[in-house]
Image (cartoon, rainbow, N blue to C red):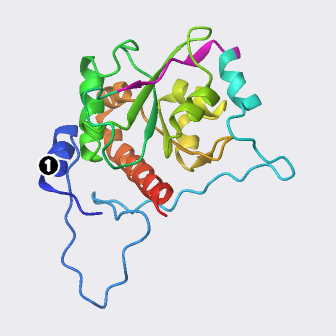
Amino acid sequence: MTLDTRQRAMLAEMGIRVWLPPPRSPADAPAPAFAPALVPSPAPARAAVSAPVAGRPAQPGAATPRAAAAVQRGWQLGPAQPLYPQADKGADGPTWLIALDSTTPDEPGGGEDGALLHKMLAAMGLKDHGGVHVATVRRAGTGSELAQLLQTLRPAVVLALGPSAASCVLGSTEPLQSLRQRAHRLADGTPALVSYAPAYLLRRPEAKRAAWQDLQRAMALAGQQGAP
């Protein structure tokens, strides 16, 4: 993945040091499907997509029993709202649905964690992109059904940031670290990925490197979904 000067600056603001590899010779092997790591650590393996249950094809827009489990635990996604409402909604690029654990659920772009969210999206090339929608985690009974959000927005990727957001999207009780290790497929076939919430990254800045690798995976999946 090639980063422009602005994206490198945004990564620097996130606290991620960008490592530039030495020039490749023509004999070098081609880059892997996921972008090469921009930090001095091994590049992540391609995330495996969870296969649907045999004999039970998922119906588009259908809610899953697992997603209902999150509601039973008291949490639900709120209504999705465009993060950049003034942006050109006709601009090219995939639609993103970000499920978010936020300290300011009524204003997902506010506060310190909201500021970091903007920096993360800027590093992904999504700052001021009209296709970015955010649904924050709220108490059950005050939000929207995930199936409705998927049917309305038809996102290329659902990115769940934080354990409660991951639970709302996947209905899973697995730890966040385990859910991060693979991609998931929702009932309508939409791919979903899990990573850390911005509020957690403010408390644990050493996790930003791993979070950036998660975001790279999400960008790769979004690109694949948008391919003809």
Place of residue 142 in the rendered image (x, y in percent of width and height, measured from the top left): 56, 8
Residue type highlighted by circle 1: Arg
Q: Is residue 182 left or right of residue 200?
A: right
Where, by quadrant of the figure, is residue 48 drawn? bottom right
Q: Nearer the viewer, residue 35 or 190?
A: 190
Q: Residue drawn 57% across and 49% down?
A: 183
Q: Residue drawn 36% across and 49% down?
A: 93
Quadrant the N terminus occupies: bottom left
Where, by quadrant of the figure, is residue 131 drawn? top left
Q: Nearer the viewer, residue 194 or 227?
A: 227
Place of residue 27 in the rendered image (x, y in percent of width and height, measured from the top left): 31, 91
Q: Residue drawn 68% across and 28% down?
A: 67
Q: Is residue 164 left or right of residue 109?
A: right
Give the magenta-colored segment's residue range.
72-82
The residue labelled by disc 1 is 6
Label 1 secondary element: helix
Q: Nearer the viewer, residue 148 or 175?
A: 148
